[in-house]
Amino acid sequence: MRNPFMHCLRLSMGTLLLATLGLSARAELVIEITKGVGQRTPVAVVPFGWEGSDASEPMDIAAVIAADLERSGRFDAVDEESMLQKPTAGVDVDFDDWSIVGTEAIVVGKLTQTGDNAYSLQFQLFDVFGKKQLVGYRMPASRGTMREAAHRAADMIYEKLTGIPGVFGTQVAYVTSQGEGKGKTYTLVVSDADGENENTIMESRDPIMSPAWSPDSRRLAYVSFEGNQSSIFVQTLRTGNRVKVSSLPGINGSPAFSPDGRKLVLTLGGVDGNLDIHVLDLNSRELTRLTTDRAIDTEGSWSPDGREIFFTSDRSGGPQVYKVSVNGGTAERITFEGSYNARPRLSPDGRKLALVHLDRGNYRIAVLEMDRRQLLVVSTGSQDESPSFAPNSDSLIYATRQGRNGVLETVSADGLVRSRLAAGQSDVREPVWSPFPRY
Amino acid sequence: MKISTMALIALLALGVSGCSKNTIPDPDASATAADGGADASTGGYGADGTSGGEFVDDDLLGPDGEMGMVIYFDFDQSELRPEYTDLLARHATHLANNPGTSARLEGHADERGSREYNIGLGERRSQTVRRMLLIQGASANQISTVSFGEERPAAVGSDEEAYSLNRRVEIKYTQ
């Protein structure tokens, strides 16, 4: 691969390794569901039919869809062995055969090769008891986009069955570290939401922190400590090009894109180390300071309408969540329950606020309902951190501990469904869920 | 190799200017658009060459012959423990007597709680040390601060022993 940073890379003897999307990483995340809802809906995803000149089908589409639905914790995929028939089109489905074994929904489909690296993926979802089609769709795919197409089918199926948009086609960015002491390396990774398809975005011997997605999913903002100075970068995923957008003396931290993608909220500390919330216009480079309190003000996060910033401040003694208008003015305190509430992240629908909450000696993820101001603890670890909502506002991802390593978990916003993404030998943290993909 | 040599010179130049600029607020710095970032991101490494070792000066050695480059803090505290008063006085005197010398104060926190908030806690500790050095004769342009929060622990582990070693400020002389 031709890499414009190669000469630099040699010069710094591997101190900073910049990689663009396309490099596959070592360990893939493995998912295990640790807690599901009591009643799971049985769904049959029948193995897809295959018509093509290739020797075999390029991917087991049904397996990807079934794994997605199971991972949600709301569905049980029917075993292939217990299927009395294996239709690949709706006309061949005998609904009685399926209702006998208690299947409530059935997915059938087929993959057809239409060119050298061109395929057509078709699927239909049926309500077994109502004996009617709920959704049917056909979409083009290549070998490179096959998995994405399968996730997209799973998203449509999930939405039909639950009324909630699926997030199987989304991505997650996170930071890992490997090794100890001088040999420690930090990596910024983007993978599919199911942990597959890991790509290294950036690698460094110095810490990497606080990744944040742009609303179009094309860029990531993050903090890097290259040269023993914190700086904020915005990197375009496809090209690997990055721009240093803030590198003032002192702290440059906690970037988050505005909903329109034009601004970043960030934390600046200055020479005197007074951390305050600022907004940086990425085009004009104009910087607006929103807080002036002498306390630590950090971890800014936008409201979905872009009018308010939620942030952490210890102006009352310990960290609590506050909000302030993007036009400045007086900050309003949001959290009152407990001595430690930090790192607020609003759900995309604006109705829930996820945060790190000190719960009887344990740092856990809690969800604050904005209407009723009720706080619900949704994680069970002792050092859980970095909550980030899925774009459907229905679940969130966060980092927890497994032994000495950090691992990622997802949990539904009501705390009922939880699954763990285990990642090999590296220490994984700071997951951030991407916005919805654009199909 | 020609391009590498030129790049090396450029990097060293960037590194040095980055140091002297560190304590001067520069509103334009945020507007630096470093395309690709390769030059800007590796610029600091010229200055980082000293991180593997430390200069020894008589006036920095304490009664026990130790340099004392790390200051530890109590849980949730950024106040200086009394035992470090003499140590910081030696560093302040050293800086005052050597105006060409500069120091980077690296603040750290233990791993509990939220990461960016911990960056704030580490910085608060750096600032405590900075103020002590300034009061005792060091000048502002000799001192820069950085906080690594919980990102660079000195001790691995999730117990109070490790935590107490990780709540610290490291003094790094950069020239």
Image (cartoon, coloured by chain):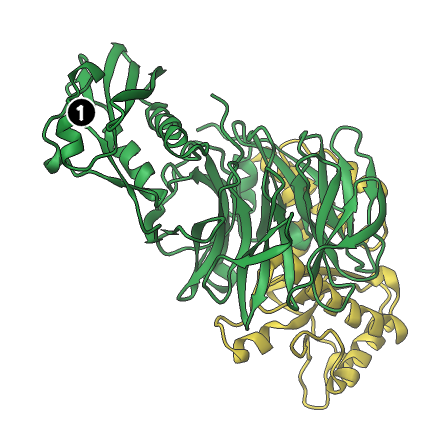
Chain colours: A green, B yellow
Q: Secondary structure at mark 1?
A: helix
Q: Is residue A246 visible?
A: no
Q: Which residue is located at x 36 percent, y 39 percent?
A: A196
Position of residue A405 relative to residue A143, above or below, is below
Asked whether, in this view, residue B88 is left or right of residue A130, the answer is right
Which of the 4 image quadrants contains residue B114? bottom right
- On the rendered image, what quadrant is the N terminus of chain A found in? top left
Give the amino acid type for the residue marked by disc 1 in the picture: Phe
Q: Which residue is located at x 86 percent, y 52 percent?
A: B24
Number of marks? 1
Q: Which residue is located at x 33 percent, y 48 percent?
A: A31
Position of residue B18 relative to residue B125, above or below, is above
Which residue ends up furthest to the bottom in the rendered image? Answer: B63
- Depth check: give the residue in front, A53 or A316: A316
- Please provide percent x and percent y for residue B70: 67, 75
Which of the 4 image quadrants contains residue A61? top left
Asked whether, in this view, residue A93 is left or right of residue B121, the answer is left
- Depth check: give the residue in front, A297 or A75: A75
Q: Is residue A222 visible?
A: yes
Which residue ends up furthest to the top in the rendered image? Answer: A115
Which chain hosts label 1? A
- Depth check: give the residue in front, B83 or A406: A406
Q: Which residue is mark 1?
A: A95
Asked whether, in this view, residue A343 is left or right of residue A408, the answer is right
- Please provide percent x and percent y for residue A34: 34, 55
Q: Callout 1 environment at 10 Å: few (<14), some (14 to 19), or many (20+)?
A: some
Asked whether, in this view, residue A358 is left or right of residue A180, the answer is right
Q: Which residue is located at x 53 percent, y 80 percent?
A: B161
- Please provide percent x and percent y for residue A335: 68, 58
- Please provide percent x and percent y for residue B169: 69, 70
